[in-house]
Amino acid sequence: ATMGFLLRAWMAVAGLCSCCFSRAWSLSASNKMPSKAGASSQPLDDNTSLITIDHLVYVVPDLQEAMNDMEEKTGVRPALGGKHTTLGTHNAFLALGNGRYIELFAPDPEAGFLKSLIGVDGGRQPRLSTFCCDAGAVGIDNLVARLSKMVDRKEYFPSSVEAGSRTNEKDGSVISWRIAVDKHSVSWNDLPMGGLLPFFIDWGEYRDIRPALTAPSGCALQSLTAHHPDATKLRELLNDIGSGITDLVQVKECAEPKLVATIETPKGIIELS
């Protein structure tokens, strides 16, 4: 009887652990998080392999022209996103498969002002400015706290988390998130490692309606390559973030920093940089 009790107790404990493990895996696989955008995400034991690419940022001078151009290149028209009322910007989206998307990010001519963010205030030509990683599965506060402890890396990694939001231009609805972007709140020439290091986002309660899942589909990100004069240092910095990044981003040595995305589209393979 004692052995039977112990066996049933062991099975109950094992069942609980199995359930918890399955739930943690499913959160990563389906990109769902129970936390709200205004609250800290629950970390999963610093499992940095769960940090993945959320989106690419394609900075453009004119949003409508960029949408037309992207449709011409890919055969898929990006969907209009909305306005960032505190930044003086607006955007559009195109899904890239596997929970990723590309954001067309432009100054909003109706805003009357423009804040420096991920290089949106510089240059007249479209360019792949930087990329953003989804930190929801590890907890964005947890991630930023860990990176902030790297004293010799402070110029590269974010040190704070803040709330962000966007107002949908079609229906006026608001979607919000939490974001760690302080090192990217600069002009083009001042982006960390030329824009080749990511900033971080947690969609919280809006995870199921984030752009990667709602934007027009048909395209797929094949690869993301970061070119930099100091390729060794860039690899080290990406490795500091986690294996989920180093497994996805190829690093190559080049005279000037440049981010290149290879995308499969209905019209064939294209490269954006």
Image (spheres, helix red, strand yellow):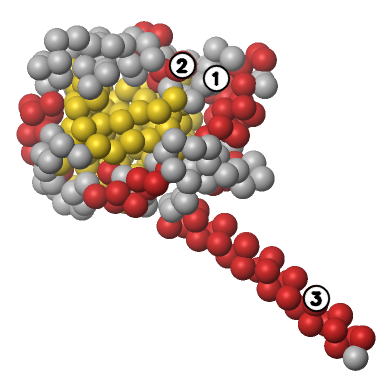
Q: Quadrant of the N terminus?
A: bottom right
Q: Earlier in the sequence, mark 2 or mark 3?
A: 3
Q: Picture quarter containing residue 61?
A: top left
Q: Amino acid at mark 3?
A: Trp
The residue wearing badge 3 is: 10
User: From mark 3 to mark 1, how far is it between C-alphas?
Assistant: 43 Å
Residue located farthest toward the bottom when viewing the structure as drawn:
1
Which x, y percent locates residue 245?
51, 38
- The x, y position of residue 115, in whole percent, is 28, 11
Q: Give residue 73's position: percent from left, percent from top.
A: 13, 38
Along the line of sight, which residue is nearer the eye, 18 or 69? 18
Contact (CB < 8 A) between labels 1 and 2?
A: yes
In the rendered structure, the answer to whether residue 43 lies left or right of residue 33 reads: right
**Residue under the image location 68 percent in, 69 percent down:** 16
Residue under label 1: 159
- Report crowding for label 1: few under 14, some 14 to 19, many 20 or more residues within 10 A (C-alpha): some
Label 1 vs label 2, nearer the camera: 1
In the structure shown, which secondary structural element does the residue marked by tag 2 occupy?
Answer: helix
Asked if residue 256 shows in the view, the reply is no
* Gap in angstroms between the C-alphas marked 1 and 2: 8 Å
Q: Which mark is residue 183?
A: 2
Give the class, few, some or many, for how many residues have Cα within 10 Å of label 3's Cα (few <14, many ≥20): few
Q: Is residue 97 left or right of residue 150?
A: left
**What residue is shown at x 43% (from left), y 53% (from top)?**
32
Disc 3 secondary structure class: helix
Q: Residue at x 11, y 46 (%)?
A: 75
Q: Type of residue at label 1?
A: Ser
Among the 4 quarters of the image, the one containing residue 124: top left
